[in-house]
Image (spheres, grey):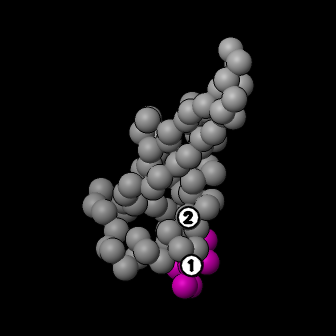
Amino acid sequence: MSEVWKTFEIEEFRGAYFDVEVYGYVTTGGSNRYGSDEPEWIECEIKDIYNPRTNKRVSKRLYSALEKQFGDWFEEMLIEEYHYA
């Protein structure tokens, strides 16, 4: 399990534009090598979302709304950050 983070620019979210820092854990497993029958896999779990201007966590309500609307995008980009960072 590796911790990763990335700053995202949120556009047109309820009429607002702002940045957030998203922190998550990336977990990998499986292997197609050495005769293993388990395919490779990768998962990402979002842990925290911060406002970079204040260095504080966003409210629970905003966290839920952001995760609902942008959760898949956050996870995909954090996995990409894990691979290429």
Residue 56 position (above or below residue 38): below
Q: Residues within 10 Å of mark 1 (few under 14, many from 20)?
A: few
Please name whichever residue, 41 or 49, is drawn nearer the observer in this view of the structure: 41
Instruction: Please provide the residue range marked out in magenta.
Output: 11-17
Q: Disc 1 residue type?
A: Phe
Residue 84 lies left or right of residue 20; in this view the side is right
Give the residue drawn at x 50%, y 41%: 26
Please indicate, yes or no, whether residue 53 appears anywhere in the rendered image: no
Please name whichever residue, 21 or 34, is drawn nearer the observer in this view of the structure: 34
Q: Position of residue 62 (x, y in %)?
A: 40, 76
Q: Does residue 24 show up magenta in the picture?
A: no
Q: Position of residue 39 (x, y in %)?
A: 69, 34
Quadrant containing the C terminus is: top right
Give the residue drawn at x 61%, y 49%: 77
Chief secondary structure of the magenta portion: strand
Q: Position of residue 40 (x, y in %)?
A: 66, 34
Residue 44 position (above or below residue 10): above
Q: Which mark is residue 13?
A: 1
Please name whichever residue, 57 or 79, is drawn nearer the observer in this view of the structure: 79
Residue 46 position (above or below residue 36): below
Give the residue drawn at x 68%, y 14%: 34
Please indicate, yes or no, whether residue 1 appears anywhere in the rendered image: yes
SS at mark 1 in the image: strand
First in sequence: mark 1 vs mark 2: 1
Residue 7 position (above or below residue 79): below
Residue 48 lies left or right of residue 75; in this view the side is left
Q: Residues within 10 Å of mark 2 (few under 14, many from 20)?
A: some
